[in-house]
Amino acid sequence: MNTLFKALSHPVRRRIIEMLRAGPMASGDIAAAFDMSWPTITGHLNALKEAGLVSPEREAQTIRYRLEISAVEEALAFLMDIAGTGRTAAHPETEEKSE
């Protein structure tokens, strides 16, 4: 979970996640959207991959990245739990404390 939130802490990585919401993208297309060196973009993509937020797929000479929604859902569930939203009967001990 720490790796996931660390990956999401950088604005470029959040922008990449936003771009991938529309569907898989080639690494070159991702890099073209930023005014950064290729190694810098590769580092951001690797951080997202290590956090489980994206997965690479080789397509001939191209590597395409796909958003892994399950990792995003896990982070969202954690944040919702902290915020106290989305409580269900599965957590009766937290509901008792809030009354």
Image (cartoon, grey):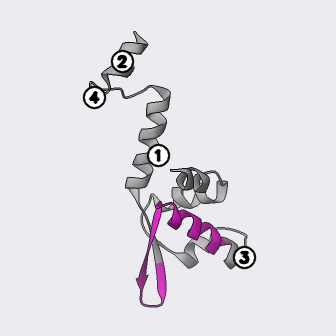
Residue at numbered disc 4:
90
Rendered image: mark on residue 32:
none
Q: In the rendered image, which residue does mark 1 sit on?
A: 75
Q: Is residue 83 above or below residue 37?
A: above
* Whole-number angstrom distance, CA of label 1 to CA of label 2: 21 Å
Mark 3 crowd level (few <14, some 14–19, many ≥20, 10 Å Cα): few
- The residues bearing labels 4 and 2 have C-alpha atoms spaced at a distance of 10 Å
Residue 83 position within the rendered picture, expressed as x and y whole percent measured from the top left: 49, 28
Quarter placement of the C terminus? top left
In space, the residues marked 4 and 3 are separated at their CA atoms by 48 Å
**Residue 76 versus residue 90 in the image, above or below:** below
> Which residue lies most toward the top here?
99
Could you tell me residue 38's position as x and y percent? 67, 78
Q: Which dot, 1 or 3, sits closer to the camera? A: 1
Give SS at disc 3. Answer: loop
Mark 2: amino acid: Glu
Could you tell me the amino acid type at mark 3? Answer: Ser
- Residue 99 as seen in the image, left or right of residue 41: left
In reply to whether residue 39 is colored magenta, the answer given is no
Label 1 vs 3, first from the N-terminus: 3
Residue depicted at 54% across the width and 63% down the height: 48
Q: Is residue 19 above or below residue 28?
A: above
The disc, 1 or 4, on the residue closer to the chain's N-terminal end is 1
Among the 4 quarters of the image, the one containing residue 56: bottom left
**Label 2 sits on residue:** 95
Report how far apart the C-alphas of labels 2 and 3 lie in the structure.
50 Å
Q: Which residues are magenta?
A: 41-63
Residue 37 bears which disc, if any? 3
Q: Amino acid at mark 4?
A: Ala
Horizontal and vertical percent position of residue 37:
72, 76
